[in-house]
Image (tube, rainbow, N blue to C red):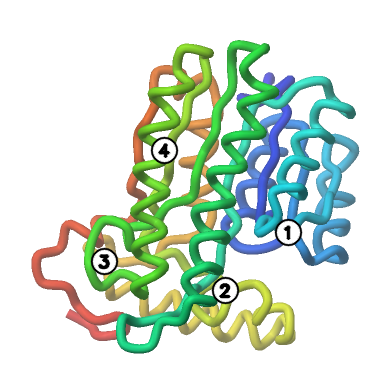
Amino acid sequence: MAGRLDGKVAIVTGATSGIGEATARRFAEEGATLILAGRTVDKGEALAKELGGRALFQRADILREADIAALVNTASERFGRLDILFNNAGAPTPGTFDDVTEAQFTYAMQLLVGSVVFGIKHAARLMKPQKSGSIINNASIAGHRYGQGQMLYSAAKAAVAHLTRIAGVDLGQYGIRVNAISPGAIATPIFWGGSARANTLSDEENQRKLAKLEHNLAHATPLPRSGHALDIANAALFLASDEGSYVNSHDLVVDGGRISQFHERPVGQQG
């Protein structure tokens, strides 16, 4: 049986944990050839080996445009095309109006907005001659509603959603679709400091934190369960595949109804 991504080449950033890893696995199941991007070399190479001959890992720091360009260059040189880019990588970005620093602001905008801008820029140069492609940006419900994330993170994710709309209009004439996914309460290591923090903990410690988080998040949405990385991976698969071929400039919210709640229950408090 043919896979939904047979013959397609995909780049997934932040592919070594959480949503990125789940999406890479889902894309591989559906036949994609993968370039896995991240900073954790041992995890990236292990995942590429597990996924088989159609996957390779390339270390990349998405704070650097040159590293993003190099991922696209690899797609061109190794596979001759690029069909899918999932701009997924990100991390918590602290800072409040009372104490935000210039360094915090610069980091948040480079990490969460700049990586999307330069991802789109470089993917488009390869996709335009093909007259096809799907770019997916990881946004957040924090960009939709107050109280779902810290100030800089929320502002940056709102920018990602709007950049998605702009890029979809600009690139649609070339057959390139640009969409976003806004995850809600998804149980991933971002809640306890991101993959960098998770990498300092044992597997057992991470599993304990994950189980506790899933329990708490199950009481924070109208659907009585936590969101999982696979929920976002499945949404990305739809947008990447031909099934989503008429979806463009759209921000797909995957949050179990969380941002539609009128009275929001604090995470961990049962209703």
Q: Please, what is the three-letter code of the amino acid marked with disc 3?
A: Thr
Q: Which residue is labeled 1 in the image?
A: 61
Between label 2 and label 3, give the one nearer the viewer: 2
Instruction: Give residue 164's mark.
Output: 4
Q: Are marks 2 and 3 in contact (CB under 8 Å)?
A: no
Q: Which element carries disc 4, helix, strand or loop?
A: helix
Q: Amino acid at mark 4?
A: Thr
Of badges 3 and 4, the one in the foreground is 4
Whole-percent x, y for residue 104 in the image: 50, 76
Q: Amino acid at mark 2?
A: Pro
The secondary element bearing badge 3 is classed as loop
Q: Residue flagged by tag 1: what amino acid is it?
A: Asp
* Crowd rating for badge 4 (residues with CA inside 10 Å; few <14, some 14–19, many 20+): many
Residue under the point 90% across and 37% down: 53
Element under label 2? helix
Circle nearer the N terminus (4, 1): 1
Residue wearing tag 3:
221
Few, some or many residues within 10 Å of mark 2 (<14, 14–19, 20+): many
- Give the quarter of the figure containing the C terminus: bottom left
From the viewer's perspective, is 10 left or right of 42? Answer: left
User: Which of disc 3 and disc 1 is earlier in sequence?
Assistant: 1
At x 66%, y 24%, the residue is: 125
Q: Nearer the viewer, residue 203 or 106?
A: 106
Q: Check whether the beta carbons of the residues at disc 1 and disc 3 lie within 8 A of each other.
A: no
